[in-house]
Amino acid sequence: MAAVCVQAELRLRDGQNRTVGVVVGNGLSALRSGISELNAKVSQILTELVDRERPRGGCTRVDEDEDSDEDEDFKDTLEPQPAPKKSKTTQNS
């Protein structure tokens, strides 16, 4: 019987596809170990991609004026609102 290959295909942000494959033998244990190996390879690729996109120099600082405006808007929504006034209705019997 011919060798079997387990593959994963990654679609990158730029639209390119990247295929990763692992050759596995016959049997469930071989398939299981092949999937584990494939998982490790894909994790490594994704980690490298994240590291490339991560800004160099640590966290970027957000403008304090913009941040404080957002906090004020959020606080406004948390303040208790007065209960609506009830109107009196009269019933004619």
Image (cartoon, grey):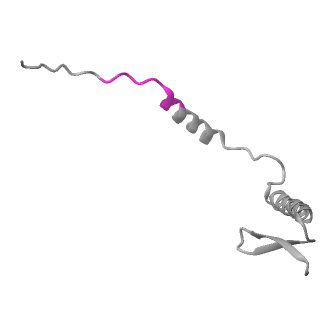
63 horizontally vs 71: left or right: right
How many numbered marks are there?
A: 0
User: Is 40 a magenta residue?
Assistant: no
- Locate residue 55: give its quadrant: bottom right
**Which residue does the image show at 88% across and 59% down from the upper left?**
36
User: Which of these two is toward me, 42 or 38?
Assistant: 38
Q: Position of residue 74 (x, y in %)?
A: 54, 34
- Locate residue 21: give its quadrant: bottom right
Q: Position of residue 20 (x, y in %)?
A: 84, 71
User: Is 80 a magenta residue?
Assistant: yes
Tell which residue pokes out farthest to the left in this image: 93
**Which residue does the image show at 90% across and 67% down from the upper left?**
27
Q: Position of residue 79 (x, y in %)?
A: 48, 25
The residues colored magenta run 75-84
Position above or below: 54 against 24: above
Position above or below: 19 against 60: below
27 horizontally vs 16: left or right: right
Tell which residue pokes out farthest to the bottom in this image: 2
Location of the N terminus (image quadrant): bottom right
Prevailing SS of the magenta stretch: loop
Position above or below: 52 against 10: above
- Locate residue 72: give its quadrant: top right
User: Which of these two is toward me, 43 or 54?
Assistant: 43
Location of the C terminus (image quadrant): top left
Position above or below: 43 against 8: above
User: Which of these two is toward me, 30 or 66?
Assistant: 30
Q: Position of residue 17 (x, y in %)?
A: 76, 74
